[in-house]
Amino acid sequence: MSREKIKVPGKVYEELVALQREIHFTLDHQDTVKKAEDRGYMNAANWIRQNEKAYKVGFSWGFEPMDDEPQGTLRDIPAREAPPVRRTISHAQTMQPRTAKKSSGSGSSGGILAGFRDWLGRYF
């Protein structure tokens, strides 16, 4: 047997690489299967369970993806979703022009200073 990397399906290879980054591989394939299943790498877990000898050889020599599946293509990118509906109301639609109304206070609308003058007139 030559020292070649073990060829695995593309999805299994991606999951094995991700699993290798997260845990320390062991030759105990049952332990690795359990850790793969716990982390959601079901394709890798099934492949290791079905190919125990190949996993042990690949553990020492490495894994590589099969040539029949292209890697890093757009097939893995999900379709773009429509933007969410905006639930805000723009101010341009709701603003009404202000009409001149007389205040119900002292009757004069001269601003703050006039209000202050009225207040002083009432109490002093």
Image (cartoon, grey):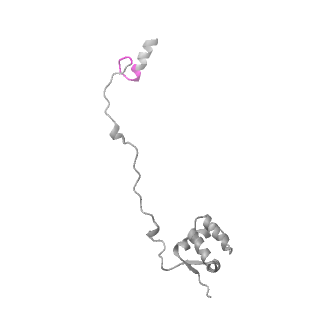
Where residue 69 appears, as percent x and y from the top left, is 48, 76
Figure quadrant of residue 99: top left
**Magenta residues (range):** 105-114
Where residue 123 appears, as percent x and y from the top left, is 46, 12
Where residue 25 appears, as percent x and y from the top left, is 66, 72
113 inside magenta stretch: yes
Figure quadrant of residue 101: top left
The residue sitting at 40% across, 54% down in the picture is 83
Figure quadrant of residue 60: bottom right
6 inside magenta stretch: no
Where residue 9 appears, as percent x and y from the top left, is 53, 76
Q: Nearer the viewer, residue 107 or 78?
A: 78
Residue furthest to the top: 124
The residue sitting at 31% across, 26% down in the picture is 100
The residue sitting at 41% across, 52% down in the picture is 84
- Please indicate whether residue 108 sits to the left or right of residue 44 in the image: left
The residue sitting at 32% across, 34% down in the picture is 96
Q: Nearer the viewer, residue 86 or 110?
A: 86
- Please indicate whether residue 46 sits to the left or right of residue 80 in the image: right
By secondary structure, the bulk of the magenta-drawn segment is best described as loop
Q: Nearer the viewer, residue 95 or 88?
A: 88
| Residue 7 sits above or below residue 97 on the image | below
| Residue 37 sits above or below residue 120 on the image | below
Does the image show residue 16? no
Q: Quadrant of the N terminus?
A: bottom right
Does the image show residue 79? yes
